[in-house]
Every structure is written in structure tokens, then in C-alpha cells.
Image (cartoon, rainbow, N blue to C red):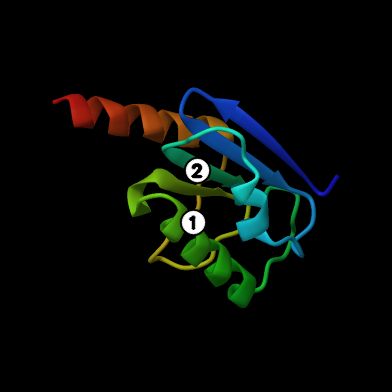
């Protein structure tokens, strides 16, 4: 399998092992609703700017801008920060949930 899908609370974690996947088809087949989307790209040492831009566009369409997180050891651009770990993404989600309650 070229990817793994996990659910934690209201968050979809999609870990990719292959960059040539159609994310639209993949997400259509997710059997649960989610408010947050974590795209885990830690397996890759290089991702072209074009592929990364497509991932970012896809993520922003799938969930709101603040609810999409990319996990990678690479950095891409200052407009879209990349988070170094899944744990940190869940920490940010928790902070966002707390802010919504205030």
C-alpha cells in the first residue's frame, strides 16, 4: 500500500509512501468525517515545489486553511509553514480547539 489512513478524534492523518497518488480519489473513500487533516510526508527527502503546491491547494480545499497541516523534514515556503512532527500537529489542533471555546 502506498499510504496509510488513521483517524484520531476528528482528525484524518494521511501518511504517504508514494507521491504519485490521486488525493482526491483517496479522500473520497475515507469512511468518516474529519475537521482536521494532517498530511504526513516524513518519508520523503525531496518533494518538488509543484507537487507541494498541489498538496497545499488540495488541503485547503478539503478543510479550512487553519485545519490542514503538512508534516515534513523539508521546508517549502514561508506562506505555508511545515510542521516537523505529527505530535506537534496534534498540539496545534488542541490549541485551535481551545481558542474556539474561548
Question: On the rendered image, what quadrant is the N terminus found in?
Answer: top right
- Residue 102 as seen in the image, left or right of residue 83: left
Residue to which mark 1 is pinned: 59
State the residue at coordinates (48%, 47%): 69
Secondary structure under tag 1 reads helix
- Dot placed on the residue nearer the N-terminal end, 1 or 2: 2
Give above or below for 61 relative to 51: above
Question: On the rendered image, what quadrant is the C terminus found in?
Answer: top left
On the image, the x and y values in percent for residue 35 come to: 41, 37
State the residue at coordinates (74%, 62%): 19
State the residue at coordinates (29%, 28%): 97
On the image, the x and y values in percent for residue 20 come to: 77, 65
Residue sitting nearer the eye, 65 or 35 = 35
Residue to which mark 2 is pinned: 37
Question: Would residue 40 be seen by someone viewing this image from the given angle?
Answer: no
Give above or below for 89 relative to 10: below
State the residue at coordinates (44%, 39%): 36
Image mark count: 2
User: Farthest residue toward the right?
Assistant: 1
On the image, the x and y values in percent for residue 46 come to: 72, 65
Q: Are marks 1 and 2 in contact (CB under 8 Å)?
A: yes
Report the Cα–Cα distance between label 1 and label 2: 7 Å
Amino acid at each position: 500500500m502506498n499510504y496509510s489512513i488513521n483517524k484520531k478524534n476528528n482528525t484524518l492523518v494521511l501518511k504517504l509512501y508514494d507521491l504519485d497518488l490521486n488525493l482526491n480519489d483517496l479522500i473520497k473513500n475515507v469512511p468518516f468525517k474529519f475537521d482536521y487533516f494532517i498530511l504526513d510526508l516524513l518519508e520523503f527527502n525531496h518533494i518538488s515545489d509543484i507537487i507541494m503546491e498541489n498538496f497545499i491547494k488540495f488541503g485547503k480545499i478539503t478543510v479550512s486553511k487553519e485545519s490542514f497541516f503538512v508534516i515534513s523534514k523539508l521546508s517549502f515556503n514561508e506562506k505555508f509553514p511545515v510542521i516537523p512532527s505529527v505530535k506537534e500537529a496534534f498540539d496545534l489542533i488542541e490549541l485551535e480547539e481551545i481558542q474556539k471555546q474561548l
